[in-house]
Image (cartoon, rainbow, N blue to C red):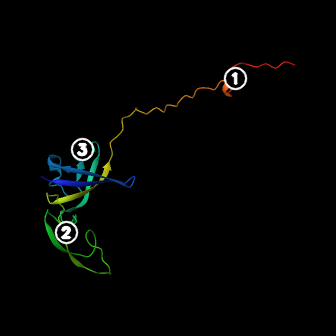
Amino acid sequence: MAKFKIIISDPETGKARFTEVEGTRAVPLIGKKTGEMVNGSVVGTPGYKLQITGGSDKDGFPIRPNVHGGVRIRVILSEGVGFHSHRKGERRRKTLRGNVITEDIVQINMKIVEKPKKAKGVKKAKVKAKTPEKTEKEGGPSTEKTTQTT
């Protein structure tokens, strides 16, 4: 059965979470392409909408969005995912993985597109802790009224 390591990024906070999905929970992800939306309950975050942004296969080759299918292929690249040129105009043949998630994929990168909506009218009330008032013996204000005579 398939086993995926899933990294979920939150663009608002800049933080990422790591989860693992295997067995029957991983089946809904097989056949999806990069850029597709996935329900968050598949990866253990119900109410969220996630977008698949990339990943890599068992040998570390990255998923490239414009390589179609779930195959590994050698492609001439000049820029983008899987290649960073050192000189202007440089091109090189690199091995990449297609944009379809198969059982050979190990890591899937996702980002949060939509968070769950909070129910209207439900607010958390702030509760202030009451402190007991100090008595006159403890150095606090006295509760008796004092009158001044002249």
Crowd class of label 1 (few under 14; some 14 to 19; many from 20; radius 10 Å): few
Q: Which residue is mark 2?
A: 96
Q: Which residue is mark 3?
A: 41
Q: Nearer the viewer, residue 140 or 137?
A: 137
Q: Residue at x 65, y 24 (%)?
A: 135
Figure check: 27 above or below 66: above
- Circle 1 SS class: loop
Q: Which residue is mark 1?
A: 142
Q: Quadrant of the C terminus?
A: top right
Question: Is 109 placed left or right of 147 in the picture?
Answer: left
- Circle 3 SS class: helix
User: How far apart are the alpha carbons under marks 1 and 2?
Assistant: 80 Å
Crowd class of label 2 (few under 14; some 14 to 19; many from 20; radius 10 Å): many
Q: Residue at x 40, y 52 (%)?
A: 13
Figure check: 140 above or below 102: above
For the residue marked with disc 2, what is the amino acid?
Leu
Quadrant of the image occupied by residue 102: bottom left
List the single residue furthest toward the right: 150
